[in-house]
Amino acid sequence: MKKLFTHSLLYGLGPQIPKFAGFFVLPLITPFLTNLDYGIYGVITAYAGLLSMLGELGISVVLVNTFYEYNTNDKWIFHWKRLLGFLVVWSVIYGVMLVTFINLILPNEAMENRWKILIVLFIQSSLFNSINVVGGRFFQLNEKPGYILVATAISGIVTVVSNFYFIAILKLGYMGWYYSSFIGAFSFFLFYSIPLLFKYKLLPSFQFNLRYLKRIFKVSLPTIPHNYAKYLLNSSDRVVMERLNISIPSLGAYNVGYSFGSYFSLIGMAVGMAQGPIMARLWFKNTLEARIEIRNIIFILQIIFLTAGFTLALWSKEILPILYRNKDFEESYVFAIVVIMSYMYYPMYWASINKLFYSKQTLQLWKISFIAGVSNVILNLIFIPIFGVMAAAVTTFVSLSYMGYSGFFLKSYKKLKDVNYYPMAWLLLSLGCLIIVYFLKDINVQNKILLSGLLIFISLSFVLKQIKKINLSSHIL
């Protein structure tokens, strides 16, 4: 558990530092932004996400597999060079596709900055992404959290300063986000490219043929629907609202609430990166005791997520005006509450999805994530015209809950004969927490303090009890 939380902070939370830094700079820049700025940026980002599934073609999973498969004799370096070479070539093709598509759907309100947006997006996607993808995996899998921490901390500071400069000082509105994002990506590129290319001699090799590509695509391409689901779940609602002629300012108000709520997902992504190697080592022990230990860790994480999410959602009404110092955003907290509670699914999701990855059941992933993403789009198309923008937040909760718990009911998972995680009980608990926090969102501050303190006390007692179980099972292992 100590290693899990330490790695979460170092190379788990590390890659999210720029986003967390952006969170803390909000009070300084939001007075200079409008719902229109958030709307334009949200729409373009959402449309760009339509092609996100093609960005790396699922090569990340091949990087991980080859690293562990050939780690004993360093053959993984040979494979990584060829994979990097392919990504370099593919990134240029992808960059052309991306800017061509964005040029076709660019909102009229952003036409004055069309070429600036397209140039920034092309350079970032075609030149930086390949090195950043491989570099991130290299330092994560080689367990070098210190370097990732330094790289992300400095890049985060650069991003924050750029955000403040372009938005608060130059008053460039939504364009400030594009410029600062570009500069942040370039910083990462420098940190990763210099050691990869010169110290570790991980130079791209272009000696790959159709036979080689077919072999890696057999593993990587089935993960595309799985990875694409992240877009369908997190960004497609903006596209649907734009297609349904929801006004850009209204869409911007929703985007503010969603953006605030999605900061909680950064914790999930951070812990997700940290728990992967730990869970893998336990799983491949192939003992009942190890699987019980995995379950105990998952239960601890689930309680922590429920407690942290409930508390943050409960205080959203008070926190959001402090960060977003703009009266246009005052009512956005109701969207933030639902979005925050949507990310309660993470620990239970890892419990099932990890086992499918370890068992090389990647063909089963679309049944979880892609169906969840498509369901989110369909539900948005049905309910947004009836119930308005709030329907998008509710469908996000429903779809993410499906993704978090559906894996337990797949035949391929049941064949693994894993220990019982009681998924339905946890799902009902998450739904109950959402309902309770939504109805208590407007109680006075004193009651919120009492409720938060009581919840933290109960959760801490449960976590300590589970940690004792882990300590006991570690002696057995």
Image (cartoon, rainbow, N blue to C red):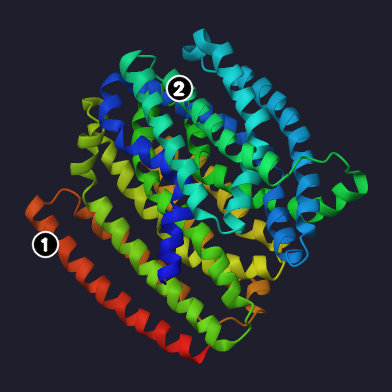
Q: What element carries label 1?
A: helix
Residue wearing tag 2: 40
Q: Which of the two labelled residues, at mark 2 and mark 1, occupies the earlier sequence position?
A: 2
* Circle 2 residues within 10 Å: few <14, some 14–19, many ≥20: many
Residue located farthest toward the left when viewing the structure as drawn: 446
Task: Give the x, y percent position of residue 282.
Answer: 57, 77
Task: Give the x, y percent position of residue 95.
Answer: 69, 27
Depth check, front residue: 24 or 301: 24
Task: Give the x, y percent position of residue 88.
Answer: 74, 35
Depth check, front residue: 441 or 281: 281
Q: Which residue shows up at 30% across the image and 25% down it?
A: 29
Q: Is mark 2 on a helix, strand or loop?
A: helix
Task: Give the x, y percent position of residue 19.
Answer: 41, 39
Residue wearing tag 1: 450
Residue located farthest toward the bottom when viewing the structure as drawn: 476
Is residue 352 depicted above or below 149 in this figure? below
Residue 421 visible? The answer is no
Q: Say whether residue 322 is left or right of residue 350.
A: left
Report, in whole angstroms, how far the alpha carbon at label 2 lies from the one at label 1. 40 Å
Q: Which amino acid does label 1 sit on?
A: Leu
Q: Please give the count of numbered marks on the rendered protein.
A: 2
Residue located farthest toward the front when viewing the structure as drawn: 199
Q: Say whether residue 406 is left or right of residue 451.
A: right
Q: Which amino acid does label 2 sit on?
A: Ile
Quarter of the N terminus within the rendering: bottom left
